[in-house]
Amino acid sequence: MNNATQPSGVVRDGRTYTSDAIAGVIGRNVRWTKEFIRRNVHHHDAGGGLLMVSGRDWRLAIERLSETEPDPKEEPDQ
């Protein structure tokens, strides 16, 4: 199937991730993850809660986040 005939919501690289999966990987809740995408990542709102983003844009946004916010999984130094 070429890109022109892909149905809405299909990622061109063949990989689709749910907000639950993304939230789990970055250690945040789903609401935070969706708001982060809406504020920081160029995205397409496909409706029904589906946000489509490019992997490159996502990686760049996560890199910026890691430079400004501590990882919530890490304990602060005592």
Image: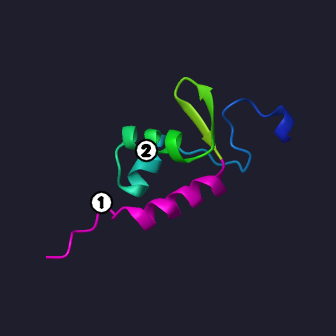
Q: Quadrant of the N terminus?
A: top right
In this rendering, position of residue 39 left or right of residue 5: left
Out of 17 and 61, give the one closest to the viewer.
Answer: 61
Task: Kindly indicate whether the residue at mark 1 contacts the one at mark 2 (C-beta within 8 angstroms).
Answer: no
Q: Label 1, secondary structure: give it.
A: loop
Q: Residues within 10 Å of mark 2 (few under 14, many from 20)?
A: some
Which residue is depicted at the point 47% across and 49% down?
22
Q: Amino acid at mark 1?
A: Pro
In this rendering, position of residue 17 left or right of residue 56 = left
Q: In the drawing, what numbered circle is on residue 51? A: none
The percent coordinates of residue 38 (x first, y second) are 52, 39
**Vertical order, 40 against 9 (above or below):** below
Say above or below: 64 vs 45. below
Q: Residue at position x 50%, y 62% from top?
A: 64
The residue labelled by disc 1 is: 72
**Disc 2 and disc 1: Cα gap in Å?**
13 Å
Quarter placement of the C terminus: bottom left
Q: Residue furthest left?
A: 78
Residue drawn at 46 percent across, 45 percent down: 36
Dot 2: what SS? helix
Q: Is residue 54 above or below residue 72?
A: above
Is 58 part of what is drawn in magenta? yes
Which residue is outermost to the front?
A: 68
Which segment is the magenta one? Answer: 54-78
Mark 1 neighbour class, 10 Å CA radius: few under 14, some 14 to 19, many 20 or more: few
Residue 37 point in image, percent of width and height: 51, 43
Q: Amino acid at mark 2?
A: Thr
Tell me which label, 2 or 1, sits earlier in the chain.
2
For the point 58% across and 60% down, which residue is it?
A: 60
Q: Which residue is mark 2?
A: 33
Please provide percent x and percent y for residue 49.
52, 28
